[in-house]
């Protein structure tokens, strides 16, 4: 069925209104350097198999071969999607990224990070957790430590300031610290 002159005129006027969007090359270069863009670039590799990331012992005070960090495609999609609970690998990756930022901004002596898997009650005894935290904090001598902690499938963040004997607890659900973590901190 042929189009009427009026329909053709309507379609042609619509084409005149549609313009190619102007894209500033500077914004593209900036966007491609952000962590999410970098993550999107490696998605095809992650589809084939998880990749193991290494960290410097300076970051957590434990060797990455003792606590391996694998990032898989579902992990990457969790980060990009932002609609599910982050697993421990993603939290480790976040801590590594934050450590990198503190080094770049000459704040490495101020901020330290507690390796999250090493302070979880599953797989660690209370003595092991206390020993790791005490050894790492006394060896690294940072002013402030960020310690991600999982309690009942919910991530919480402890900010530990050893010189002031202070722990600040952040929980989006307003939960109080568990008895286990209080005991570990008092040890």
Image (tube, rainbow, N blue to C red):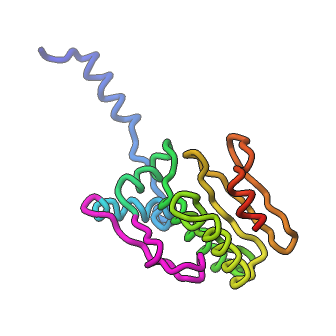
Location of residue 110 (image quadrant): bottom right
Location of residue 149 (image quadrant): bottom right
Q: Tell me: residue 15, above or below residue 64.
A: above
Q: Position of residue 109 (x, y in %)?
A: 73, 82
Whether 27 is among the magenta residues is no
Q: Position of residue 63 (x, y in %)?
A: 50, 80
Whether 68 is among the magenta residues is yes
Report whether 120 appears left or right of 43.
right
Quadrant assignment for the N terminus: top left
Residue drawn 71% across and 76% down? 134
Q: Residue furthest bottom?
A: 139
Residue drawn 30% across and 29% down? 12
Q: Residue furthest right?
A: 164
**Which residues fall within the magenta stretch?**
47-70
Q: Tell me: residue 62, above or below residue 114.
A: below
Q: Position of residue 37 (x, y in %)?
A: 44, 61
Q: Nearer the viewer, residue 14 or 6?
A: 14
Q: Tell me: residue 118, above or below residue 62.
A: above
Location of residue 18 (image quadrant): top left
């Amino acid at each position: 069925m042929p189009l009427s002159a009026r329909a053709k005129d309507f379609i042609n006027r619509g084409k005149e209104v549609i313009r190619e969007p102007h894209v500033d090359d500077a914004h593209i270069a900036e966007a491609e350097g952000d962590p999410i863009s970098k993550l999107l670039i490696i998605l095809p590799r992650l589809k084939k198999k998880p990749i193991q990331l290494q960290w410097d012992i300076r970051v957590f005070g434990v060797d990455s071969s003792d606590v391996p960090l694998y990032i898989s495609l579902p992990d990457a999609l969790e980060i990009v999607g932002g609609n599910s609970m982050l697993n421990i690998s993603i939290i480790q990756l976040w801590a590594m990224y934050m450590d990198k930022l503190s080094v770049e901004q000459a704040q490495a002596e101020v901020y330290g990070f507690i390796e999250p898997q090493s302070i979880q009650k599953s797989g660690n005894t209370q003595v092991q957790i206390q020993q790791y935290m005490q050894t790492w904090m006394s060896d690294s001598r940072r002013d402030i430590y960020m310690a991600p902690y999982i309690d009942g499938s919910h991530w919480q963040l402890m900010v530990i300031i050893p010189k002031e004997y202070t722990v600040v607890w952040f929980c989006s659900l307003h939960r109080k610290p568990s008895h286990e973590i209080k005991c570990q901190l008092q040890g």
